Image (spheres, rainbow, N blue to C red):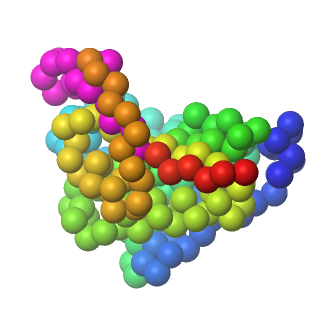
Amino acid sequence: MNSQEPILNDFPDHFETERLLVRCPRPGDGSALYGAVEASQPELNRWMPWSYNYTLNAAEVFVRGAQAEFLRRENLPLSIFRKTDGLYLGGTGLHDIVWNVPRFEIGYWLRTDCTGEGYMTEAVIALTDFCRAHFQARRMTIRCDSLNERSRRVAERAGYTLESITHHDRRGLDDNTLRDTLTFAKTWPD
């Protein structure tokens, strides 16, 4: 990997697991994304500020911008589809990238009617493996609100360990109370 010019690094724009296709967003994915957000609005509004007043137009703008970010290697947003029927399950991706470590933060969300089936844990484990294989990742993190039990359990099931708690670092979207952020991490030596 050429850490000085990440855009020159070639790596796949997708990968598969037993049940999932995880790939770079593409133009035209906006309607599938919008449907998943609409189906999950009450849950997403508790944790994701971008989900408020979401529109079909905003979804299409997002997927097109996400593809551009992926190609520039600035962020690596990914869409998650169920292989059996092509249902858009949610999103994940790599953010806060530091290529010369390499270090990545994983973010994720899943449509509410598909939670509890292990899809996100499967995606996070596969994304972690993808980062090790293609980027030789040395550090990966997952951050979540301390009250977001589902997100916390995904990190734990994927083998991440609680590294730190940042106390009172933001306000809850649903009740404006002070919240803590949990940081889970996996690291590997040089």
Q: Main secondary structure of the magenta part?
A: strand
The quarter of the displayed image where residue 54 is located: top left
Q: Residue 42 or 129: which is nearer the viewer?
A: 129
The quarter of the displayed image where residue 36 is located: bottom left
Residue drawn where x is 29% and y is 49% of the image: 151
Q: Residue 101 or 4: which is nearer the viewer?
A: 101
| In the image, residue 177 lies in the stretch drawn in magenta | yes
Q: In the image, is residue 100 above or below residue 34?
A: above
Residue drawn where x is 17% and y is 41% of the image: 42
Magenta segment boundaries in residue numbering: 169-184
Residue drawn where x is 23% and y is 24% of the image: 179
- Can residue 68 be seen from the camera position used here? no
The answer to whether residue 131 is left or right of residue 53 is right
Q: In the image, is residue 178 above or below residue 147?
A: above
Residue 37, position as x, y percentages in the image: 31, 47
The answer to whether residue 136 is left or right of residue 33 is right
Residue drawn where x is 45% and y is 59% of the image: 124
| In the image, residue 185 lies in the stretch drawn in magenta | no
- Can residue 113 be seen from the camera position used here? yes
Residue lying farthest to the front in this orientation: 189
Q: In the image, is residue 51 above or below residue 149?
A: above
Q: In the image, is residue 68 above or below residue 127?
A: above
Q: Residue 114 or 159: which is nearer the viewer?
A: 159
Residue lying farthest to the left in this orientation: 175
Q: Residue 56 or 36: which is nearer the viewer?
A: 36
Residue 140, position as x, y percentages in the image: 54, 47
